Amino acid sequence: MIIKSAEFIVSNSEHSKCPQDGKPEYAFIGRSNVGKSSLINMLTNRKGLAMTSSTPGKTMLINHFLINEQWYLVDLPGYGYARRGKEGREKIRQIIENYVLEREQLINLFVLVDSRHEPQVIDLEFMEWLGENGIPFSIVFTKADKQGPARLQQNIDNYKEKLLESWEELPPVFITSSEKKQGRDELLSYIGSINNSL
């Protein structure tokens, strides 16, 4: 899939105020500082489309970007940012849960995971929750260029092993690097193939 246009449409905190034109939505989510904004900018080839920040937890709202005037790329708030305080975390949790569970236009949720780290409980629990609620999702490993290929493969294998302890089969897995544009074609092809089957 070639991205010819990508434009920011709207930000809000309530799923009911999201666009009502029925176009399919592909949402991106992950822990704070996982590289979500960089990945979105890399996918769309627009440097400042999603705001990147060295401070985790910047995305507090549901952000809709219209791609090729056909589908929405949705940037969701990052979860689990400790410095936000209990009240802030609860608010974000509500925004995420309401969108994920209630948004009929959501076709697939891409869960971003930092490929450098061991499987984190917060990510595993979130995926478990998605499974329990029948939400289709894929795993996107980010920052693949930040370590050697052998270490990267080992980390991803460890992650898959951990997931298979509670999952019969794994969701689709993508390996990405925003700096090297790795995984871009695979992710866009995947979205394109789903769109073609709708």
Image (cartoon, helix red, strand yellow):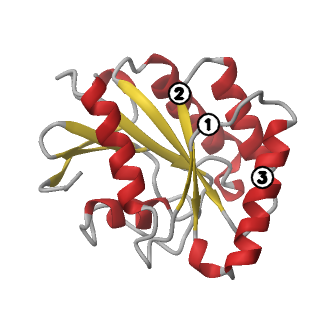
Mark 3 is on which residue type? Answer: Tyr
Disc 2 crowd, CA 10 A, few/some/many (<14, 14-19, 20+): some
The amino acid sitting under disc 1 is Pro
Q: Which residue is drawn at 72% across and 67% down?
A: 153
68 or 103: nearer the eye? 68
| x 12%, y 41%: residue | 69
Q: Residue at x 70, y 71 (%)?
A: 152
Question: Which residue is denoted by mark 2 in the rendering?
Answer: 136
Query: In screen coordinates, is 13 left or right of 167?
Result: left
- The reply to whether discs 1 and 2 touch (Cβ–Cβ < 8 Å) is yes
Which residue is disc 3 drawn over?
A: 159
Check disc 3: other Cα within 10 Å, few if <14, some if 14-19, many if 20+: some
Residue 190 at x, y = what percent? 39, 43
Marks 1 and 2, the one that precedes in the sequence = 2
Q: Which percent across, then down, holds residue 150?
A: 74, 76
| Residues at discs 3 and 1 in contact (Cβ within 8 Å) | no
Q: Can residue 145 be seen in this view?
A: yes
Q: Is residue 117 visible from the viewing direction of this image?
A: no
> Looking at numbered disc 2 in the image, what kind of residue is underneath it?
Pro
Which percent across, then down, holds residue 75? 40, 47
Q: Is mark 1 on a helix, strand or loop?
A: loop
**Residue at (33, 65) in percent of width and height:** 41
- Tell me the residue that label 1 is attached to: 171
The Cα atoms of the two marked residues, 2 and 3, are separated by 19 Å
Is 194 rendered above or below residue 88? above
Toward which corner of the image does residue 10 lie, by quadrant?
A: top left
